[in-house]
Amino acid sequence: MKQTTPKIIKAKHIGFCFGVKRAIAAAEGLLGEHKKTCSLGPIIHNPFVVEMLSEKGLKVISDIKDAKGACLVIRSHGIPPALKKKAQEYCTEILDATCPFVSRSHKIVSKLRKEGYLIAIAGERRHPEVQALIEMAGPGTLVLTKKSDIRKIRPRKVKLALIAQTTISRDIFVEIAEALLRLDYPECRIFDTICNDVVGRQKEAKALAGRTGVVCVVGGKNSANTKHLAEICRKVGALTYHIESADELSPAWFKKALSIGVVSGASTPGEIVEKVVEKIKNIIL
């Protein structure tokens, strides 16, 4: 009997989120004016977009001193206030493209620090967003990547506040928050600072993974929100492949599949997702 052709189910939430669109538009605006433009680190975590902007003239730097005489686009992940102040010494113009959700986290952390809270951040220590928050939160800041990290904490008689990296898995954040609330702190405040777009993609990925046998998660390998989507799909039990482009697809992945899900990170161009869907169709037909 001939095998039924697998059904491809594409997530509704694909393409750039608002914050990513805003950062790219900011960079392209300066480049369109033929201004010498740079970003401190990749403007977003997608290699194809970074390369596209590089070809248009956007230079990615790792040291703010290299921005001397140039326009600086502050990437979507944001930078610490001290670094922004230092950038003013070197740059002819600064265009702040920090994601509004990240900016909200900055304001919350600044307020909490003034009020004397010990701040805990649910997120990845090496992520640029978290690194900026650590500097703003001050000495003693706790960074919790997973629930088990809480075992290392020795509760003190201080006020504690928890915020989230905007791209963290909602499930992980809830686990960390619940575990913190069980510790003996006189006060513990929880701030859900996860991006709404990220939460929507996570819910959809979880649902798709439950309905399909195979899921292709499309996005940069260095993208935190995309990696979390892949983790969510694997946790549900779907055979999950995290890819950056259609070139990585393998026919072997779909041989026994009855249905195939396609989801994408917030920094993945919609056209890349469409190319992935089109190539899967060519493979299975």
Image (cartoon, rainbow, N blue to C red):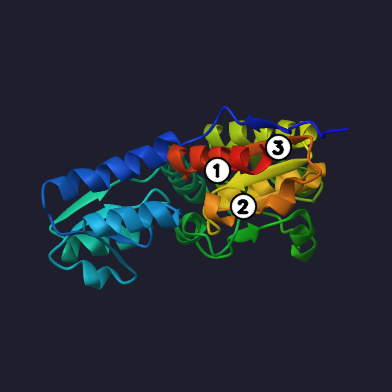
Q: Position of residue 228 (x, y in %)?
A: 65, 48
The reply to whether residue 122 is in sight is: no
Identify the mark at residue 201; answer none if there is no mark.
Answer: none
Q: Position of residue 159 (x, y in %)?
A: 64, 49
Q: Earlier in the sequence, mark 1 or mark 2?
A: 2
Q: Position of residue 129 (x, y in %)?
A: 48, 54
Identify the mark at residue 249; answer none if there is no mark.
Answer: 2
The reply to whether residue 32 is in sight is: yes
Q: CA distance from mark 1 to mark 2?
A: 8 Å
Q: Is residue 167 left or right of residue 284?
A: left
Q: Earlier in the sequence, mark 3 or mark 1?
A: 3
What amino acid is found at the position of numbered circle 3 in the picture?
A: Ile
Q: Quadrant of the N terminus?
A: top right
- Please state which of residues 6 and 239 is positioned toward the viewer in this rendering: 6
In this view, the residue farthest toward the right is 1
Quick one: label 1, few (<14), some, or many (20+) residues within 10 Å?
A: many
Q: Earlier in the sequence, mark 3 or mark 2?
A: 2
- Please state which of residues 273 and 101 is positioned toward the viewer in this rendering: 273
Q: CA distance from mark 3 to mark 2?
A: 12 Å
Element type at marker 1? Answer: helix
Quick one: label 3, few (<14), some, or many (20+) residues within 10 Å?
A: many
Q: Relative to residue 46, is residue 24 depicted above or below?
A: above
Q: Position of residue 220 (x, y in %)?
A: 52, 54
Element type at marker 3? Answer: strand
Q: Where is mark 3, residue-wise? A: 260
Q: Quadrant of the C terminus?
A: top right
Identify the residue at image location x=74%, y=62%. 153
Q: Is residue 149 left or right of residue 21?
A: right
What amino acid is found at the position of numbered circle 1 in the picture?
A: Val
Q: Where is mark 1, residue-wise? A: 276
Q: Is residue 49 left or right of residue 123?
A: left
Mark 1–mark 2 CB contact (< 8 Å): yes
